[in-house]
Image (tube, rainbow, N blue to C red):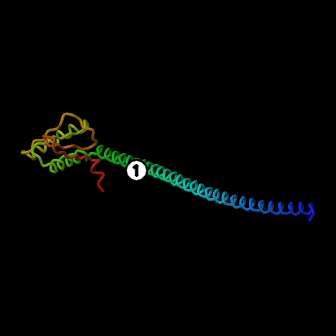
Amino acid sequence: MNIQEKIRAMVKHIQAKSDEELEKINADARKRSDEIREKYKSTAEQRYAEIVAEAKKEAKQITRKQSARSELEAGKLVMEARAKILESAIDEVRKKAEAVITTENYPSVLKRLVREALETLDEKSVVLKTNTEDRETVKGIAAKLKKEMPNAKIIVAKENTEIKGGIIAESNDGRAAVVNTIAKKRRKP
């Protein structure tokens, strides 16, 4: 074999070895590339799952906050509605009490309220509290009841009480009291 053929054979051999090595390097590079891709794909999927879980958690918190806020607002609206209903009912009772107070029958109604309070309280010594408008009428009623109940000591208090139509009867020592007003009577069904 001549030199040129030897060189060609050697170049061919080197070329074959180079191609083999290149194929090995490419295979290793592909393998390494696939490993890296899988690793990053797994990491990306894990990070994606974490982000989704965090977003769901935040969404639940926001939903809870909104629900609580809505419940508070609804409760506030219910309370306001109840307050308006109660205020309306109180105004209605006040109007009815004022209507009774202006009738001719009011002194007899007042006498019945005083008598009921005295019977309910069941004390020997009683202090009657009333408002300025009813004071003289209550004094007259007390004088009549003293004659009917000689064992009872009935005193009309000098200070005014903030009530409309009726009395507050207290034991002389202040330990027991009966509020007997037209407004209280009207509330009963």
The number of discs equals: 1
For this view, does 64 lie left or right of residue 18? left
Residue at point 86% right, 63% down?
12
Q: Quadrant of the N terminus?
A: bottom right
Q: Quadrant of the C terminus?
A: bottom left
Q: Position of residue 15 (x, y in %)?
A: 84, 61
Residue at point 78% right, 60% down?
22
Q: Position of residue 156 (x, y in %)?
A: 16, 38
Q: What residue sits right under mark 1 in the picture?
A: 82
For this view, does 65 lie left or right of residue 51? left
Three-letter amino acid code of the residue under disc 1:
Arg
Between residue 21 and residue 9, name the one nearer to us: 9
**10 Å crowding of disc 1: few (<14), some (14-19), many (20+):** few
Where disc 1 sits, the SS reads helix
Return the residue found at the far bottom: 1
Between residue 8 and residue 94, name the one nearer to us: 8
